[in-house]
Amino acid sequence: MAGQISPTRSALLASKASLKTATGGADLLKRKRDALIGEFFALVKDALGAREQLAGVSKGAYTSLFGAKAWDSPEAVESLSLAGTGDYAVDMQIESIYGVKVPRINVPERTQQASFSPINVGARTIQAATDFGGVMEAIVKVAATETKLRRIGEEIKKTSRRVNALEQVVIPGIQDDIRFIRGVLDQREREESFRLKKIKAKLEREKNEENVQAGQHGTAAD
């Protein structure tokens, strides 16, 4: 960049301002990255907890399903599953975590009331249906938590790339520009100082010659 910049004092001031802006931007991005990393690790715990909860309720639900099929027959259980509704509504909103848009999903309270008539339905089948309702809740929680985790992780990577670009490319480039401009300006000052010294010496020499000539004329007149 040094070869493309005009080595003037105004360019030096502009480069210093750019360096200050880039340094401040890198500091802000690093603080944002650190905050996101803290949020990321907090969400990791939540995600692991949600996964463990899903594994636990899934195990219990499948145990209930196997029992229902054994006691009420597979045909009865499958027929009942086809009769149930497939709708599952959730309340989803978008929130911002340090500038990252992530979903916030509120899982509605699950009604314990069966969506079908319990007449001629075995207790184990009803229990299996209830248990799989818990599985659905757990899946939604896992999806919400891991979506947040993924988006925050992507933002951490993006922010780290920006920090690296500023610290490894932009800031060193501006510093090179400043060194180049200062070097040229210093060289110009040295050249100007040398030129002024030569002019001063020449003027003093001419003045001395004039004084000598004046003295000689005075002596001749006497």
Image (cartoon, rainbow, N blue to C red):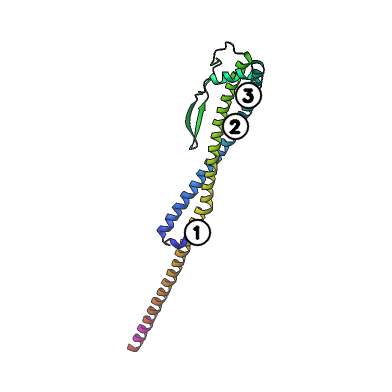
Q: Nearer the viewer, mark 1 or mark 2?
A: 2
- Say above or below: 105 vs 213: above
Q: Are marks 1 and 3 in contact (CB under 8 Å)?
A: no
Q: Name the residue carrying label 3.
A: 57
Quarter of the rendering occupied by the C terminus: bottom left
User: Which residue is tagged 1?
Assistant: 176
Residue corresponding to mark 2: 47
At a point 43% along the width and 58% down the height, the residue shown is 12
The span picked out in magenta is 211-218
| Mark 1 neighbour class, 10 Å CA radius: few under 14, some 14 to 19, many 20 or more | some
What's the amino acid at mark 3?
Val
**Which is nearer the N-term, disc 1 or disc 2?**
2
Q: What is the three-letter code of the residue carrying label 1?
A: Asp
Query: Who's the residue at 42% across and 72% down the image?
Result: 195
User: What numbered label is drawn on residue 191?
Assistant: none
Label 3 SS:
helix
Which of the two marks, 1 or 3, is nearer to us in this view?
Answer: 3
